[in-house]
Amino acid sequence: MNGHHKIRELGLKQAAAAAWPICLGYFPIGLALGVLAQKAGLPWWAVLMMSVLVFAGSAQFICVAMLTAKASIPAIILTTFIVNLRHALMSSALAVYLPGVSRRFLALYSYGITDESFAVNMTRFREENWSRWKALFVNHLANAAWIVATTTGALVGQFVPRGAFGIDYALNAMFICLLVFHLRGRVYLLTSLLAAAISVAWYLFIPGDSYIVGASVSAATLGYILQRRHRRGK
Amino acid sequence: MTFFDYLFLFLGMGLVTYLPRALPLVYLAHKKLPQWLVDWLNLVPVAILSALLAPALFVDSTQRSFSVGKPELLVAIPTLLFALKTRSLGGTVLVGMFLYWLAG
């Protein structure tokens, strides 16, 4: 009984060691999101509700931006769906390391699959003896940090003057850094440039916010076709 | 917006976020996605991130016109270099905000 307890404690420690960079990274971003949401007119309890029910950083930023632009609720939900569809791939990749695990565990685990927790857990699963419980701890520690940071941001937002500390740039900076993480080769760079060009043209000529979905789907498809041609040509 | 508007919006967002995270893991745990889908999905994140970012850097949103030399674009260059050098998400956000604050 005592030994079992010790093992569990050790697991929690290892999970915390793996999760702290995520939590540290989430804090400024979460604070920025909370402040932006407060500026957009969202009460603190709505920010708390959003972080608990959605737990998806980029989608939450986009939601705040779209609410500021007076977008409709269906448009926000559709954009969230498209933006978070990428997690289906991560979820499939994780399935390799969680074979035969109960559906109830997987249903709970799925809630915490984010770009960051996926990256951390996947690296650990590949390199060492990482257990599913440690992976679940990582997910929930990251989630806790996210909820605290975003709600705090919303609560202190009213004391932060408009445009202070360049907070309006937080989203762009986060996208730039995530882009750097994802540029793992020439085809990724090419897809990124295509998406940038198409989205700007789409944004200029077509009103509304369909440019996000339109440009990303067409750029990914063009990138895929180019990649396949290149492979065949070899 | 009322309490129920927010609840409806976030439940909807939560559902469309949760399902793509849960369904492949729960139901496709022992199956493999077709290779073409994996290849295509691999390119989706960079495409989305670029489509989100580019208009903010190159378009004057008040007039919806093309614009080169916005402070957003100028700040993006050192921010990108910092991200490439450090690969730190939190650090890049703070540096980007600080530079934008200086530029503004």
Image (cartoon, rainbow, N blue to C red):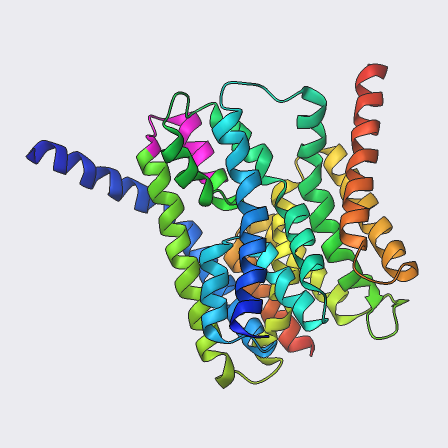
User: Residue at point 47% right, 60% down?
Assistant: A51
Write down the region rendered in magenta.
Answer: A119-132
User: Residue at point 83% right, 75% down?
Assistant: B62
User: Residue at point 46% right, 63% down?
Assistant: A49
Q: Where is residue A1 in the image (x, y as percent from the top left)?
A: 7, 33
Q: Position of residue A40 (x, y in %)?
A: 61, 76
Q: Nearer the viewer, residue B2 or A13?
A: B2
Q: Nearer the viewer, residue A225 or B93?
A: A225
Main SS class of the magenta portion in the image: helix
From the viewer's perspective, tell me whether residue A165 is left or right of residue A13: right
Q: Which of A3 and A69 is in front in this view?
A: A69
Reply yes or no: does residue B40 show up in magenta.
no
From the viewer's perspective, tell me whether residue A219 is left or right of residue B91: right
Residue most extreme to the front: B4
Say which quarter of the image contains residue A11: top left
Q: Where is residue A140 in the image (x, y as percent from the top left)?
A: 37, 48
- Above or below, A181 against B3 in this view is above
Residue most extreme to the right: A205
